[in-house]
Image (cartoon, coloured by chain):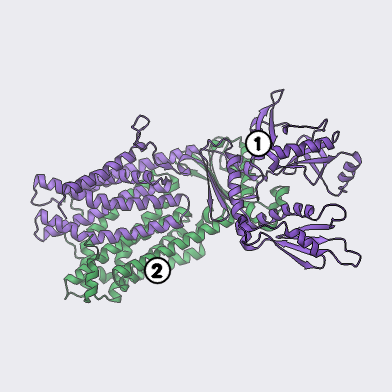
Amino acid sequence: MLQFPPWKIGLIAIVLLWGVVMALPNVANMSGAPGWMPKKGVNLGLDLQGGVYLMMEIEPDEVVANRLDVLARDVSSALGGSPSERIRHLPELKGRTLEVKLTRPDADGNFPTQEALKRLQKLNAPVGGAIGGAQLYDIRITSADTISITVPPTAEESLVKDALAKTMTIVRRRVDPDGVSEISITPQGDNRIILEAPGEPDPQRLKDLLNRDGRMTFNLVDSSPAAIQAAEAGVVKTGYRLLSGPTTAPILVNNIPEITGSDIANAAQSFDEQNRPQITFRLNGNGARKFYETTRNNTGKRFAIVLDDVVMSAPNINEPIAGGNVRITGDFTQQEAIDLAAIIEAGEMPAKLQFLDQRTVSPTLGQDSINAGYTAALIGLLAVAVFMILAYGMLGFFAVISLACNIVLIFAGLSGIGATLTLPGIAGIILTIGMAVDANVLVFERIREEQKEGRAAWTATQAGYERALSTIMDANVTTLIAAVILYLLGSGPVKGFAVTLAIGIVTSVFTAYVVTRMVTVGWMKVTKPKRFNI
Amino acid sequence: MLIKYWPETTNLRFMNLRIAGALFSMVLIAASAFLMVTRGLNFGVDFAGGTVLELAESDAVNVPAVRAAMPINAEVNSARGTDGREIVVVKFGEAAPDMLGEEFKNLTAEQQAERASGATNELVVRTLKEKFNLADEDLLRNDSVGPKVSQELFTDGITALVVALAMMLVYIWFRFQWQFSIGAIAALAHDVIITLGMFALLQIEFNLTSIAALLTIIGYSMNDTVVVFDRIREDRRKYKKMPDREVIDLALNTTLSRTLLTSGTTLISLFAIYFLGGPVLQGMSFALIFGIVIGTYSSIFIASALVLSLGMDFTKKEVVEEVQGFTGV
């Protein structure tokens, strides 16, 4: 127990040295250090550096409904075709079911449901693209004139998974279009996303960016005054909607878009001839061709660029436009134009995001918390040190040395596993300072008892360390259990507390039991005391 | 030792006081239960949902002005901020649906329930920013939790407490005997209930960090109890003829100076957090200070006293071997 062969001393020294190297970036600027040394200190949680935390969710019901809504457009083309092939029908989305009602029976009064079912089945695809797997849609005839399309549970699971992945990409592209910020976007569970933006003071801008569907369409416009007048009186022409925009009076917009968001290759903010911010975007090959055809067939008419049911721009088509370069000028600030370009380029959200949990801490408050935590730790450490030295003299001093090693190792551990230091985490470190000396106290009390029974310093130390071990292990394992549970079930700052507590328990057993013992033994070899003055 | 903080040998008859201790604890538990039912816990936004805003106080921004400017019912209070400056704390739930705009009114009831909290937050922040011409940095904190997440956080917190207690029960059972297991769990439950009673009495905000504090109290109290149990087991084996009551008193007396020293250093650290760590950590450190005192008390008067009442038996050979469990480490 009291023998420390050179290899053991070397090993302990290596652990402590590793601790110093790992913990160093927390107190010193490492920019000039050699390449093998770590440069970055412990990650600070949002409560310490300030920033925005958002927890968002997509609803599976909405993912399914949106998917069926998209499918409704395909249904129309599947049942359409030349007049002889056409099956007249009316699609209607009822919650999670798309009902296709056939509207025209044949001469015998029968509806061509079998033929329609055969054509609709072609829209079906295996889940996840695997051949022979479960089908994406459940398509069946539910009455003499109705075919119902639903999404079965297995397909829904994979739809939601895809939607979450797609949403994360869109979130990333919208909030961080240049890919340079420190914003972290992580999935949680099956349908949640957590966004953490350090240093961002205002959650509203992020929420505004993420709140929009991002559904971008080019639609033809019916600009006959009579139709608009009728619509404003409440009679909207079938197949059209009355929409307006910040710079556009109400116009009648065709429900079926000519160009959609998937036809857009990229979008960016730039300036027009008068140096006003504008949004320019380029259509991909398919989009550019469609756009050329549309403008050629509708020269002289108007078309509308619609984003989330708001008309962004409604220019006249003066001539066929080739090349697929489009721009939107309007009354934007530069930031608005940048944000809109990011939204247009990122594409349409598979489902609307719900904001479940939102936390913002200003960077100044974060810095104040760091300062307060630092002061509390320093005072706590000093007070404990004085207390231990007063109680145990030289042995108490050794315990304080190992306590200092412990703090270095905690920071090294936090850096090493890339953990995040939060405000409750700082409390965890301070608490560990108080509790870490417990192992030393247990040993010293044992040594004192052994001395009282007449043993000399050396044998008393031996017995003290041996007897205290099982108690120290039991006591620390139970606290470790609490810390692990806290980590597994806790969230955010509480997780940070659990991590520092757990690391502190492991390092404190090492420093209090091993480092203190080594220092004590070394000191005893030099001074050869008969008794400890404890 | 350099200071005589405690007599070298004490011979306090703790177990003579165990009936009195049990009565005292029962009164505390009953009072805690009563307080929790009548006053209830002061749930923070983590568990109750809603929003809490913290604004830096200034000539224009003060409690009456903010109260007057609020578009909906809210609790507006003054508090001391981390660096000593005054802050205004605004706490509110959800606004009526017709205040949240046309788009909100058209949502389904289910969607409204989920979005109300966030929409109200936006409404209030916009109103206050316009009214007081606030910059982003004047808004020190803006936390808003929806009903779904607050419910989940609460369930997770309770689960954490229950799972922690169960794991401790199993560990002590494995390392000692079932009597010790019962004693330890009773002591932990005692600590948790009375600390919750304290939260209810003083209406300290009960939030996620409070759950962390409760788990730490469980860990600390367990730590303390295990040290005493270890000694009881050791002394029981050493003094075969001594009655249980005397063995337990002896173990408590020999561990007493350690108990007081460790509680002392831990309390020093906690008082440092309480007084210097800023308001965010004040509730947590208060709970811990209280819990450490109550946890030290319960190791003696609940855990050890229950072991005495239930009886223990270390004459079997395999139990003695189990005691050696860790000495080979």
**Mark 2 = which residue?**
B27
Locate residue A99, reporting x and y percent.
Answer: 77, 61
Question: Looking at the image, which residue is at 72% across and 23% down?
Answer: A273
Badge number at residue A266: 1
Determine the colour of chain A: purple
Query: Could you say which quadrant of the image residue B315 lies in?
Result: bottom left
The x and y percentages for residue B118 are 61, 49
Q: What element carries label 2?
A: helix
Determine crowd level at label 1: few under 14, some 14-19, many 20+ residues with C-alpha closer than 10 A: some
Q: In which quarter of the image is residue A330?
A: top right
Q: In this view, does A110 lie above or below A393?
A: below
Subunit that carries the residue with mark 2: B
Chain B colour is green
Q: Which mark is nearer the camera, 2 or 1? A: 1
Q: Nearer the viewer, residue A41 or A287?
A: A287
Left or right of A36, for residue A399: left
Relative horizontal placement of residue A396, taking residue B143 as reference (left or right): left
Q: Quadrant of residue B49?
A: bottom right
The three-letter code of the residue at mark 2 reads: Val
Looking at the rendered structure, the kind of residue marked 1 is: Asn
The answer to which of B54 and A138 lies nearer the viewer is A138
Instruction: Name the chain under label 1.
Output: A
Q: Is residue A530 visible from the viewing direction of this image?
A: yes
The residue at the point 54 percent across, 38 percent down is A201
Q: Give the quadrant of the N terminus of chain A.
A: bottom left
Res A313 visible: no
Residue at (37% x, 41% y) in the render:
A374
- Front-most of residues B208 and A528: A528
Picture residue at 33% right of the left edge, 61% below the top: A478
- As drawn, A75 above or below B323: above
Asked if labels 2 and 1 share a chain, the reply is: no
**Neighbour tally class for label 2: few under 14, some 14-19, many 20 plus, Cα within 10 Å:** few
